[in-house]
Image: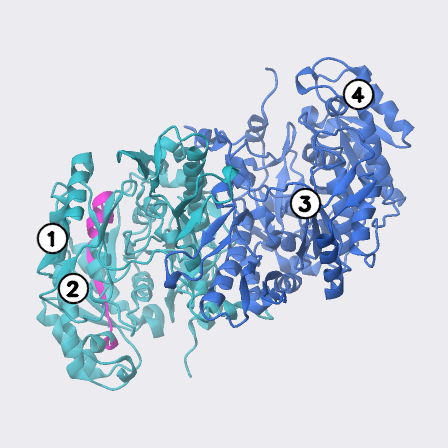
Chain colours: A cyan, B blue
Amino acid sequence: MGFKTDIEIAREASKKPIQQIGAGLGIPEDSLIPFGHDKAKVAAEFIAGVQDRPNGKLILVTAINPTPAGEGKTTTTVGLGDGLNAIGKNAAICIREASLGPCFGMKGGAAGGGYAQVVPMEDMNLHFTGDFHAITSAHNLLSAMIDNHIYWGNKLEIDERRVVWRRVMDMNDRALRDIVTSLGGVSNGFPRQTGFDITVASEVMAILCLSNDLDDLQRRLGDIIVAYTRDRAPIYCRDIKADGAMTVLLQQAMQPNLVQTLENNPAFVHGGPFANIAHGCNSVVATTTALKLADYVVTEAGFGADLGAEKFMNIKCRKAGLAPDCVVLVATVRAMKMNGGVAKVDLGAENVDAVKAGCANLGRHIGNLKSFGVPVVVAINHFTGDTEAEVQAVLDYVRTQGSEAHVCRHWAEGSAGITGLATRVAQIADSGVSQFSPLYPDDMRLFQKIETIAKRIYRADEVLADKKIRDQLRAWEEAGFGNLPVCMAKTQYSFSTDPNLRGAPTGHSLPVREVRLSAGAGFIVVICGEIMTMPGLPSVPSAEAIMLNDAGQIDGLF
Amino acid sequence: MGFKTDIEIAREASKKPIQQIGAGLGIPEDSLIPFGHDKAKVAAEFIAGVQDRPNGKLILVTAINPTPAGEGKTTTTVGLGDGLNAIGKNAAICIREASLGPCFGMKGGAAGGGYAQVVPMEDMNLHFTGDFHAITSAHNLLSAMIDNHIYWGNKLEIDERRVVWRRVMDMNDRALRDIVTSLGGVSNGFPRQTGFDITVASEVMAILCLSNDLDDLQRRLGDIIVAYTRDRAPIYCRDIKADGAMTVLLQQAMQPNLVQTLENNPAFVHGGPFANIAHGCNSVVATTTALKLADYVVTEAGFGADLGAEKFMNIKCRKAGLAPDCVVLVATVRAMKMNGGVAKVDLGAENVDAVKAGCANLGRHIGNLKSFGVPVVVAINHFTGDTEAEVQAVLDYVRTQGSEAHVCRHWAEGSAGITGLATRVAQIADSGVSQFSPLYPDDMRLFQKIETIAKRIYRADEVLADKKIRDQLRAWEEAGFGNLPVCMAKTQYSFSTDPNLRGAPTGHSLPVREVRLSAGAGFIVVICGEIMTMPGLPSVPSAEAIMLNDAGQIDGLF
């Protein structure tokens, strides 16, 4: 193989001291809280002091429905940021933090790939600056205080069968999904059935990522519904008096992390909520801070555009008052082929017809994104095996959709391979053509919000939900939660709820299995299909091969 | 009140940049891994490079049996370190890290008190540099991999009833003491009863604190016994193939943390194993590193001298090849009074007779410590209400025991209040009079090791242990574990196992309830009485009052 692996490239990185990266954004050294020499948090006091500055341009990177072929969304986010800097713009990127637990199951989620990576990779996949550990602690403190309240007399009259607040751990541990606690007699409390979720599924994670500042954080933490009484009255985190201590535990974690790309450009890496039961974007604080410090901010949303971009627009932008100036939709020739019916093993052979067939998936995403009023550019993330005819087929197709596509070679070439896209994105963002608005107003009925997304984004014919679910939605409307956006949890692999239905399916229904109220985060989770909130490890976990080599480097993590 | 609180004093601290504190020890800036501006880890590469330097003098601070009156062991450790620096010596202190969980129950364990404190206090009681979070992750990764091994076919033939490796959380959560996991059907595994301990009780914590370097760490982690087969053959962590990934998770945590005292002297704060089921001292790496960088290193051991100093000598010093040059035994007039039978509410009134009566406890500790061949100096940690006659009674008594006592006012005056003790301690340490040797040889039988401690330290008449326990000890000897030291777990409040038996009791027995093998840490835990490894929260947890104040400071933590 003539190619270097991601980890080989990352280890050759010539990193600058993080103070120098901060200085490039105008952050004084004493406003950076260092974690080692290559990571820092931006001090809250500094952030408070730049709030009256104008915002830079916001560029969202999203993608077609993911396939096993890979689409390279983070790689393109990193590459586009480097590309903008390479053409003389002052740009920063904002991405999510990685979860620790899954790294010990499958190989770790590197931050980008090839010559478009964020470093230090190892730290970002391990403890990083401790944010997720802080979230775990804050979440579990509340859990302990709930059981402790019941233990000492249960003045709030919590119905032990209706404690909805579980515990979390940043680990893939299926044995903790469903447990009975408080066994062993009087001194250990009242036995009850509960379980653990993985930390990224915690509502505390979603809250941290949607809060504007520490006051907002504490208010939202207080709003968490942790249990109900026998007559179904909600018990809030505030009633348990845990919100203050949780805020203290999260004070440091609320400050966004600054690292750098391989090309020494600034990267904010902060927060990482699940893209199914939560909204799947990096923190509002990171994005809004970056917008005050850089002229262009490139960020991404989890999963494909039908889930990730939809939530970015309808939840994050709505809540934080943000508006994207341009959207970049990442596609690959290989993914088009898979959407066109080609199996993964056959991706090596040229198949222009399959590419053309698969473009339907791309076209639908373009149309969907345009319905938010934002300009859309397609980035064709070039793979070495892509043929000219295949690439041309995508370019031609995108033109028929009233959009434009650019071939990007940032994976192999770094910023030099993506200056074309960067130039166009900057022009579009500067042009002010974006007329962003969310898909539905706050005051739409909850069920109608679900229908709007199902019909206009997923192109489903109908939403199936039994009476219990419709009654629950009505009850929340009556309780004052009707103005919340909905947070869709469905498979990322298809517009429908069937992960095998690629392309641009029509005629399907959206069955709603369950709805949950995240009153602190401020959304209604709509669960369509099986959603796993505590993963397991595979039969041969990657942890078995993770170890320090003789040079003290970490092998096996990637 | 004319006195400032600890937190008021700490907030007024004039901290120096941690790089400056490191420079005072000869640590170059790039060998310090900063965590903010006032905390840093000392890089492993730097530590490896100073191993051929001569060691400084090692001073152990220990105490009489603790009473509710408080004895001020950490305060004296900090004060003595500052005192040595004040008289022109190059001194550093080494203390333990605080556990996060208990801070939300009772008020946080400050690092010292008055004008003898280590800062930043808040960080040290919260996430600090993330070491305990790393230990939690490493421990629970092993737990997940054990259940995952069973789930995927159990090739090692682990007896599910004999999995001895539990999970940990750094939280006071009684509901997790005794749980059933893997409920919910086939995809969640095989239900079994287990539980959580608090992180400081993890064998991983003890291992981290006893390991010399990363190779030693990985070897010891591999040695952990996690389960047994049906025919009682041990299953090791190494068999589960978790030792490499656990070492990776602990790589950063293995590097000692450097902070500073209120007087800007260096303080290593690293590791914090339980003083009952583990050995209760800061890490070997911190102590041995400090000894290479400072001429005098003041460190402490958990609980009273009968438990803490005994384990420091018989476990830590034995394993790490350390030898204390002087031992400082901390006593207070108030604690003497309580040992002499005075109730806490009556401590305000002068009572010289009670002081004299209580001195028996002090005297026995002096004798015990001398049996290790080390010189002993008593530090009378002065409280404002102590009368001259009471203090004189202690001074006189100590003289009758062939030792010397010094009145120390570091709590009120900082280093200026403890220069007398500091001067004498330096003289004694320099004199080379210490002839340290552990209390028993490696090759003594395990039960005889327990007897030796019981009779020579606790002054018990006999050790009571049923046949099952004696058989277990013999079985471990046959399996090759006979050369390990024993780690006693008993109440800290008395020489006996009855916490109410103050003073210097005789005629008691030591009943051994249970023995456990910590094959990775390298000791046999001998449990005498009830030992709680997962605390609960009180009816009004301190967490309810912990919050950020308007100045962004943390209230309620102390």
Element on which disc 2 rests: helix
Q: Calculate the distance from the C-alpha at mark 3 to the C-alpha at mark 1.
A: 61 Å
Q: Are marks 2 and 4 on the same chain?
A: no
Residue A548 placed where, x, y %?
56, 67
Element on which disc 4 rests: helix
- Label 1: which residue? A452
| Quadrant where the image shows the C terminus of chain B | top right
| Quadrant where the image shows the N terminus of chain B | top right
Q: What amino acid does circle 4 point to?
A: Val
- Label 4: which residue? B355
Seen in the picture, residue A424 relative to A391 is either above or below; the reply is above
Q: Earlier in the sequence, mark 3 or mark 4?
A: 3
For label 1, the crowd category at 10 Å Cα-Cα, with few meaning under 14, some 14 to 19 and many 20 or more, is some
**Res. A365 mark:** 2
Q: Residue pushed farthest top?
A: B349
For label 2, the crowd category at 10 Å Cα-Cα, with few meaning under 14, some 14 to 19 and many 20 or more, is many
**Res. B280 mark:** 3
Residue B163 placed where, x, y %?
55, 59
Tell me, yes or no, whether the highlighted magenta stretch contains residue A314: yes
Magenta region, residue range: A313-334
Q: Calculate the distance from the C-alpha at mark 1 to the C-alpha at mark 4.
A: 80 Å
